[in-house]
Amino acid sequence: MKTGTLVFLVVILIVINLAALATIIYERATSQPEPPFPSIHEPTFPAHAPMALRELHLTRQQRQELRQSRKRLMEVTASLEQDLMEKRQQLFAAIEEAQPDIKRINILIEEIGHIQTEIQKQVIHSLMTDHAFLDRQQRKLLLRHIEQRTSMKAKRELWHKRGIGRGRQP
């Protein structure tokens, strides 16, 4: 290869690298910094908080109690969620067997139902506890938000089962 061609290629590569470096520097200089993770001491909910929480206009004390309530609920339901996942895995393993045992499958379905019922009970009990520190309007808004979320989740699951919203299927 000639020396002139080699020099030309090196110059082109340097120009490409400088352009890429300039682009990275420009992007970093003009981009907005990520907001820090909100602490429990913030006076208001951050912009990325769910709309319902901002609509509730909670006091600092109410926000703290709601966070503590959510943390307690997560601690209580974590083991139940784990059990539920294990039972579902067992169910699918039982279904995939060469000779599926219908009795075993029915038992697993009932166990899954019991776990789901227990999770629902815990969620409702937690919600009822939350009512103690919310006023009437806040309770109404919170319940409306939960109802909308659960109905939207149910619709998404139904759409997913029917293949709606997933594009073309082969």
Image: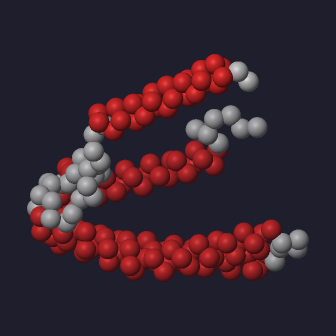
In the image, is residue 129 above or below residue 166?
below
Residue at 58% over, 44% down: 159
- In terms of image quadrants, where is residue 95? bottom right
Give 100 or 78, whichever is nearer the viewer: 78
Q: Position of residue 2 (x, y in %)?
A: 70, 21
Residue at 59% over, 72% down: 85
Judged left or right of residue 154, residue 3 is: right
Judged left or right of residue 3, residue 48 is: left
Looking at the rendered image, the quarter that the C terminus falls into is top right
In the image, is residue 117 above or below residue 58?
below
Looking at the rendered image, the quarter that the N terminus falls into is top right
Judged left or right of residue 121, residue 116 is: right
Q: Position of residue 137 (x, y in %)?
A: 16, 56
Q: Is residue 137 visible?
A: no
Give 128 or 170, whichever is nearer the viewer: 170
Q: Is residue 20 visible?
A: yes
Please name the colour scheme applied to the rendered image: secondary structure
Q: Position of residue 160 (x, y in %)?
A: 60, 47
Residue at 41% over, 31% down: 23
Q: Position of residue 109 (x, y in %)?
A: 65, 74
In the image, is residue 105 above or below residue 53?
below
Residue at 68% over, 80% down: 107
